Image: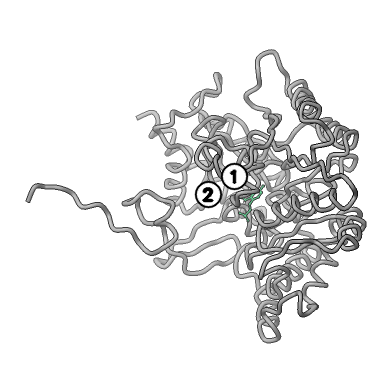
Amino acid sequence: MDGARTSPEIGFGQQAFTRPPGAPPLPRIARGEGVWLIDTEGKRYFDASSGPVASNLGHGHPRILAAMEAQARQAVFAYPSQFESAANLEFAERLGRLAGPGLDRSFIVSGGSEAVESAIKFARQHAVATGEASRWKVIGRQPGYHGNTLGALAVSGDEHAHEVFGPLLRAVPRVPAPLSYRLPPNHTVESHARACAQALEDAILREGPETVLAFIMEPVGGLATGALVAPDSYYATVRQICTRHGVKLIYDEVMSGAGRTGRFLAADHWPDARPDIAVLAKGLSAGYAPLGAALVSAEMVRVVAEAGGFMHGFTYNAHVMSCAVGAAVLREVEDADLVGNAARMGELLLGKLQALAAHSPLVGDIRGKGLLLAVELVADKHSKAMIPLEKVAPARVQQLALRHGLALYCRRTSRGAYGDWLMLSPPLTVTAEEIGILAERLGAVLDDYAAELRA
Ligand code: PLP
């Protein structure tokens, strides 16, 4: 034998595509129960981030399971071009009422990326129908994330993805997101946010306003910015700029929508900056079925319908089972006041994280709204120095967390260009006692990781 090593086998599971060959196996899910996920060995993990900020109602929710069973006994799938469904109507009506005027019609798809694609195509077709066919450019933010299909990725601000997939993506103008932790020299959070809003207007003027269709942004950031929240004035200014130049404002609320930030839409925190279009997914079905929606006004729908109808669709548009799940989730969000609970438990969790930050050398920043919170990890709080890339902070913290029975969603942005953060976004059903357990386990994980970094 020449001692040559054979490379590890490539398994059949989804993991084989995304994790390095030979990476330690992940726990295998057996079942879920409230905020807990339980593996086939019986080990319990607190779902501290709701998976990728999706499981808003926790796991095994009896009302959702009952609604799924009832729907399954009736009809699971009927193509919406052939049949109307009660599930579609109930879901869309509830969603319209919760989202409010101007966003009360929804085009229903299977997830966030599809919803973003739908929003952009709808805005474009509306522009064509209203005699503004010269408008096609969509301005995005850097960093920002709107999904992984080629269109959604094109408007996302992720340098690494653009490097790899660039030739396949349409180059779109991007403007800086108003990051609040590491500021450019001589800037305050407020002045930087003002400069970022100005950069949007500059970009529109540079491109030619008559060519700009839309500006897309996450009102409360997700994984790309670690739950970034801008100063209030930013939202109003962006809205004014878009209105001034006839540019549609699209809020990507795939993560922030459906009650997570303590309002049904994150947009509800800034009533003077309502978007023209909003995009939801994730919490809309709380992970019980693939579901997303592009929310627009009835007037926009009328214009597009009169011009021949929306030239868009998928096999699983307004899927009957997904809509039944969405309707049941929204019923529960209202009946159990989960939006209020997100606001209350978010305050409690924020306080616990601040207490952790006081003693952990790794917690540089905590930000977010309601139960959409992020902790930014640093090597040095004073200098805000990032953890060296070779320490693979997010992956390692995720591993340590599993040992402590905590399932965490973590991110190193664009190969470390912006920072490392952990999303703290438990199900909106979480109780005060459970928040205590989450904080205690997170403290132990951070202590372990700090000790490793010192070693
Ligand atoms: N937009 C935002 C803000 C997201 O966070 C995500 C997913 O994380 C998406 C869009 C894409 O959603 P999906 O993964 O359901 O396609």
Instruction: Answer few, some or many: residues within 10 Å of disc 2's Cα (few below 14, many 20 plus, some between 14 and 19).
Output: many
Q: Position of residue 50 (x, y in %)?
A: 60, 55
- Residue at image location 67% in from the left, 58% down from the top: 56
Q: Is residue 51 visible?
A: yes
- Residue at image location 87% in from the left, 40% down from the top: 273
Q: Amino acid at mark 2?
A: Leu
Q: Is residue 430 visible?
A: no
Q: Amino acid at mark 1?
A: Met
The residue singled out by tag 1 in the image is: 423
Q: Position of residue 443 (x, y in %)?
A: 52, 41
Q: Position of residue 269 (x, y in %)?
A: 83, 43
Residue in the foreground of this view, choosing between 8 and 220: 8
Task: Answer left or right for 18 relative to 156.
Answer: left
Secondary structure beneath disc 2?
loop
Q: Quadrant of the C terminus?
A: top left
The reply to whether callout 1 and callout 2 are in contact (CB within 8 Å) is yes
Task: Answer left or right for 26 relative to 369.
Answer: left
Q: In the figure, residue 156 lies in which quadrant?
A: top right
Residue in the foreground of this view, choosing between 320 and 192: 320
Compared with 131, 385 (above or below) is above
On residue 270, the disc is none
- Residue at image location 79% in from the left, 54% down from the top: 122
The residue singled out by tag 2 in the image is: 408
Residue in the foreground of this view, choosing between 364 and 168: 168
Q: In the figure, residue 60 lies in which quadrant?
A: bottom right
